[in-house]
Amino acid sequence: MLAKTANQSHSIFVMAAARSAKPYVINLTERTTLEEANRLLATCAPYPYRQLFALPSLRQQLIHYVLNRVSKIYVVAHHPRLAKKQYAPAVAQKPAIRQALEEGMDVIASSYLKRRTSRLPAPLPQPLSAAAMN
């Protein structure tokens, strides 16, 4: 038996099981986001994107950025492996996820690089030549 409940930003699919077991809530949007991030980063230029998003903190920030901007799909099931196999990733969400990933990569990378360059010391003044002093 399958029932669907939805609101503006979340869809929840409930899969009833014949026996009572501890139910699991599986976020299919997160899984799809991780898969799309891996695909997108594999095709990007090594610098800055692949290099920056190899850092766990920036990759985590990117995933959070996307998940805060797309609607989520959850599955409630008694067996997480079964739920993941039965429900294909949200194909309809992929364009929105990919757009949010691209936007997030630009925003996070530029912010990170701006912070790093602002911490660099100012260049030393050039010594005056003898002709300039006269």
Image (cartoon, helix red, strand yellow):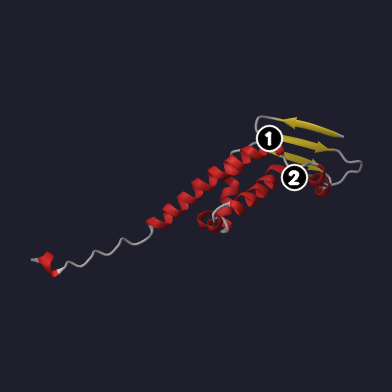
Could you tell me the amino acid type at mark 1? His
Quadrant holding the N terminus:
top right
The spot of residue 23 in percent (x, y) is 81, 44
The spot of residue 87 in percent (x, y) is 79, 41
Q: Residue at x 56, y 59 (%)?
A: 55
Q: Is residue 102 above or below residue 113?
A: above
Query: SS of the residue at dot 1?
Result: strand
The spot of residue 92 in percent (x, y) is 69, 35
The spot of residue 48 in percent (x, y) is 50, 55
Q: Is residue 40 above or below residue 56?
A: above
Could you tell me the amino acid type at mark 2? Ile
Q: Which mark is residue 26?
A: 2
Q: Is residue 79 found left or right of 45 in the rendered image?
A: right
Q: Nearer the viewer, residue 42 or 103?
A: 42
Q: Nearer the viewer, residue 128 or 4?
A: 128
Closer to the chain start, of discs 1 and 2, is 1
Q: Quadrant of residue 102?
A: top right
Q: Residue at x 12, y 64 (%)?
A: 132
